[in-house]
Structures are given as structure tokens and as C-alpha cells.
Image (cartoon, helix red, strand yellow):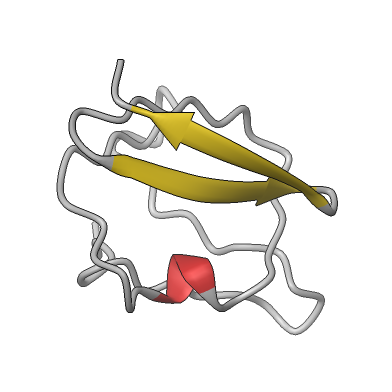
Amino acid sequence: MIKEYRGLVRTREDGSEIINYDDPAFPSYIFDGYVYSGCTWEKVPHFHKDIELLSVHSSCMGYSVNGKNIFLEKG
């Protein structure tokens, strides 16, 4: 599987995200790492039909879902 490199989001022409699942037999993708402030997750609007779960281990982050801004903190 090709993994993202430092938060690079790849999209199709319609804006849907290309997700490289960990195991095609069980379509899931787990990323446990540092999201740096310049990553494209911050800059590239994208969408997907998958459920997305986030956990902030340290510091904080802003997140936008369907135009609603959400502030996430550790925990």
C-alpha cells in the first residue's frame, strides 16, 4: 500500500479522497503520527464516505466538517 507522506491528501477529479486501505479485505486505514501545521489535510478540501475517528494525543488542532469549524484538544 502507498501511504501518505507527511499528511499528503490525494484526490480524484471530483474531490473525493483516494484512501490506501491497510487491508483490502477489511477496508480500514489507521494513521498514528504527527500532523504538522503545513500538511495538505489543512489545505485540500476533500470528502469520503468512510467514517473518520480522530484522537488528539498532545496539543490541539482545528478541524472543519461540512463548513463547521471544530476545535479539538488533547484527550
Is 39 on the left or on the right of 53, as rendered?
Answer: left
Residue at 73 percent of width and 39 percent of height = 49
- Residue 73 rendering spot, x and y as whole percentages: 38, 29
Residue at 31 percent of width and 30 percent of height = 56
Q: Quadrant of the N terminus?
A: bottom left
Q: Nearer the viewer, residue 23 or 14?
A: 14
Is 43 on the left or on the right of 26, as rendered?
Answer: right
Q: Nearer the viewer, residue 21 or 46?
A: 46
Q: Quadrant of the C terminus?
A: top left
Vertical side of 8 occupied by 28: above or below:
above
Count of marks overlaid on the render: 0
- Residue 18 rendering spot, x and y as whole percentages: 54, 63
Most extreme residue toward the top, as rendered? 75
Vertical side of 40 occupied by 75: above or below:
above
Residue at 48 percent of width and 25 percent of height = 53
Asked where in the image residue 2 lies, by quadrant, the reply is: bottom left
Q: Nearer the viewer, residue 4 or 2?
A: 4
Vertical side of 67 occupied by 11: above or below:
below
- Residue 27 rendering spot, x and y as whole percentages: 46, 30
Is 22 on the left or on the right of 70, as rendered?
Answer: left
Residue at 34 percent of width and 41 percent of height = 60
